[in-house]
Image (tube, helix red, strand yellow):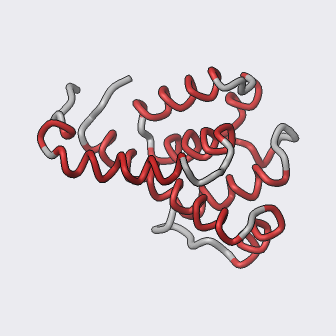
Amino acid sequence: MTARIQWAKAAPDAFNAMLAMEEAVTKSGLDKPLLELVRLRASQINGCAYCVNMHAEDARKGGETEARLQTLGVWRDTDFFTPRERAALAWTESNTKLSQQHPSDQEFEALRQHFSDAEIVNLTLAIATINAWNRFGVGMALKP
């Protein structure tokens, strides 16, 4: 399948709005390695090949290990991720799968143990942003 629309050119205001969200995430103070794990995990769930490829490569460039990248989809079954990362990954999954499950009070309380209120808001923005990017990637049939 070829890309359906070059959406950034077709609707530059939409693209610029996405870039503004991404800039807010970048300026949020959340560490880049954590953000790449969140982006990659949401992209895996959403089946966005373009974003999975990009964020796996970005994570590698940032020093992420192959073992962690290869087991991200089964992070609950490994000891490779810190409690802070695990809380963020659970929050990512439940906020990405809203039609299947809502974030639980238990997941929220786990977040509170590792993140400030502002960090929780910014993490949720990061999740919302990558989910939006995924919709453009999948919807427009972007390929790596």
- Relative side of 103 to 127, left or right: right
Q: Position of residue 18 (x, y in %)?
A: 34, 50
Outermost residue toward the bottom?
105
- Relative side of 97 to 38, left or right: left
Q: 40 above or below 70?
A: below
Q: Position of residue 79 (x, y in %)?
A: 87, 41
Residue nearest the observer in this picture, 79 or 62? 62
Identified at 40% across, 30% down, the residue is 50
Quadrant into which the C terminus falls: top left
Outermost residue toward the right?
79
Q: Position of residue 143 (x, y in %)?
A: 33, 26
Q: How many marks?
A: 0
Identified at 68% across, 52% down, the residue is 89
Identified at 41% across, 53% down, the residue is 21
Q: Position of residue 141 (x, y in %)?
A: 27, 35
- Relative side of 41 to 78, left or right: left
Residue nearest the observer in this picture, 96 or 129? 129
Quadrant into which the N terminus falls: top left
